[in-house]
Amino acid sequence: MPLLKRTTFPLLEPPENLDPNEKLFQIRFTKEIFRDYQKYLNRLNLYRQKVWTCEVSGKSNLTYEEALVCEKQAAVKAQQLPKELIAPVLRMIQQYRTLSFTDLLEKVYSSLQLDPFEGLELHAMKDGSEAACKILKVIGSGSTKLCEVGWLGQDNAVVNTSLVKADDLICKKAPASRKTLKIFIRDSTSKRCPWIVNVDLAKKYGIEIEPPEDIMNGEGLYKGRKRFANGEGASKKLKKDEKLVELPVKYPIDDLLVKPATDDPVLSKRPPLSRDFRVPINSVGDLLMVWDFCSSFGRLLCLSPFSLSDLENAICNKESNLILVVEIHAALFHLLIKDEGEYFTFLLNKKKILKVTLVTWAEYLCNFLEMIRKEEFSSKVSTIRRGHYGLLDTGLKLKILRELVEEAITTSAVREKLNEWIDQQQALAAAKREDTRKNREEQKLNMEGMPENERNHTDTLQNDKECPGIQRGGKEEKGLNILLSSKTGDGKMFLRRHLETEMEQQSVRSSHLGKDRLYNRYWFFRREGRLFVESADSEDWGYYSSKEELDALLGSFNIKGIRERALKHQLEKSYDKISNALEKRSKDAERKTLLEEADLRRSTRVHAQPKEDDPSMSFLKYINKWKQK
């Protein structure tokens, strides 16, 4: 069973009192049955997230279905362990059951190489030359250990036998690889430290699986290790009468396992999220997906840019033929028709004229919904055909747009554009690396020609620049800038900035920045001055919109946890870019508020109507400047 957060995830029991005529929803790979469609989608979305771990191999960052496939493949690999090794390995697992997985694996691997056992095939000296043999019986122990071996002939058949000293046996390669042993150990045990052999295997090979008394009494799990005084980190067994010792925790660890300690730094309180979205909270993800796709592929779609707020306000409006909404749908339909894929074929079969206009766009939308055949949309086709698209629920409008975007992503034009961007990014990155390498070489040559005192001074200044936590005087920083400018050239400094700008402009936000302790995902889009936060189940969204909130957020992360350490690193890496975007948006919002208040005061004095320049209605002024004529 795939693991979630390193624990077994129980499947749901079938609903009670099922009616043969009842409409149900079943997940294909778990066979779970749902009456409620939304619960079905929520569980399916969880299974599609890369948060699962293969129980057998330990491979992580998988979807549930990928973890199932991984477990099947690992189970096949576990059977690759030679049959003659199974019993000895199981006995060693039971003998060293209290070791950590890494130590247990190394112990079994080394024992197989050093200790002879029945059934092992290897080589020994016979009549002055090496010959293949198989251990039939082990006699004695220690330095006097003898082995009765059978000399192997054709088809690995035993020809005759003789006694050979254990030290004279020749093992040319390990009987089994670490990878095979790793998978076998995980597959053949039912518990974790102490490792307990599965009952069926234990009975088949006569393995005693009763735990010793010290484990039954709760002792011995952390016994057996201590650090050497020289600090090399080696371990050795403790005496039986030594007390239980608690091993220090090596950070970072899983965030949910982090416990507060007295020496922890004081973490700031995490700021509350803003949630003043106009669309339903569980539709924010669809809103962002549609907007980001249209913004990223605007040139390909012949669709000029628009703000996220404009899209949100337009989708929530009850008008049926808003220019922005129509242009988005028309651009996506044109892309699908040009691709000559499934939608194009569907239209040809219906003998439709392949020209999407302000009048016909709704009919093309109905054709698309009929093509994908999803029940939640089918019942709304008649409403759209009657010209009442605007009366649809906001969440349903976004779901339809999401379906269109997902279909558009599969077109050859989008795939070619993505490949082109990937190639450009790789080329830009290579150019940046080459520029950096040449600059280093030039600086090294220039440093070699300097007097020693000037060279040391420049080294100090360069270190200060690389370590911003160390402050220097303004004159020294100015001197460094002049020195680097004179040695490397303003043109090359400009080239480096140009390459960084190009890479930023070519990037498409396809993955989140990271996750916090509770698996909430953090998203930043370079065209939108907000930092979005998505809950683990994708049902809840919020955002931060100020630099102060970003600073407080960074101060709230506990870097002892794996996820929050990585997330903080990523946010700090992009801090300037994100904080500048947040500040710009805050200033724009403040300026708009001041203008609105000024207009309101002026209109009150002259008894006139307020100026019709409401920012929330700016989507009404949208004009597609990139539209093909």
Image (tube, rainbow, N blue to C red):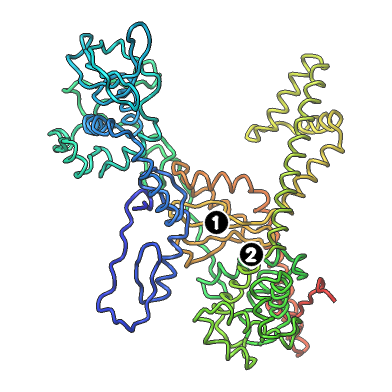
Q: In which quarter of the image is residue 153?
A: top left
- Out of 36 and 177, give the one closest to the viewer: 177
Give the answer, above or below, for where 625 lies relative to 212. Answer: below
Residue 320 horizontal side relative to residue 625, left or right: left
Residue 66 horizontal side relative to residue 483, left or right: left
- Out of 168 and 587, give the one closest to the viewer: 168
Viewer-nearest of discs 1 and 2: 2
Instruction: Please give the label number shown on residue 522.
Output: 1
Task: Give the labeled residue for mark 2.
Answer: 410
- Out of 383 and 350, give the one closest to the viewer: 350
Give the answer, above or below, for where 582 lies relative to 452. Answer: below
Q: Extreme top residue here?
A: 128
Q: Quadrant of residue 458?
A: top right
Rendered location of residue 30, percent (x, y): 36, 62
Callout 1, which amino acid? Tyr
Rendered location of residue 299, percent (x, y): 77, 65
Q: What element carries label 1?
A: strand
Callout 2, which amino acid? Thr
Q: Which residue is drawn at 33% across and 40% down?
A: 79
Q: Which residue is drawn at 52% across and 87% down?
A: 379
- Residue 223 in sight here: yes
Rendered location of residue 535, percent (x, y): 47, 61
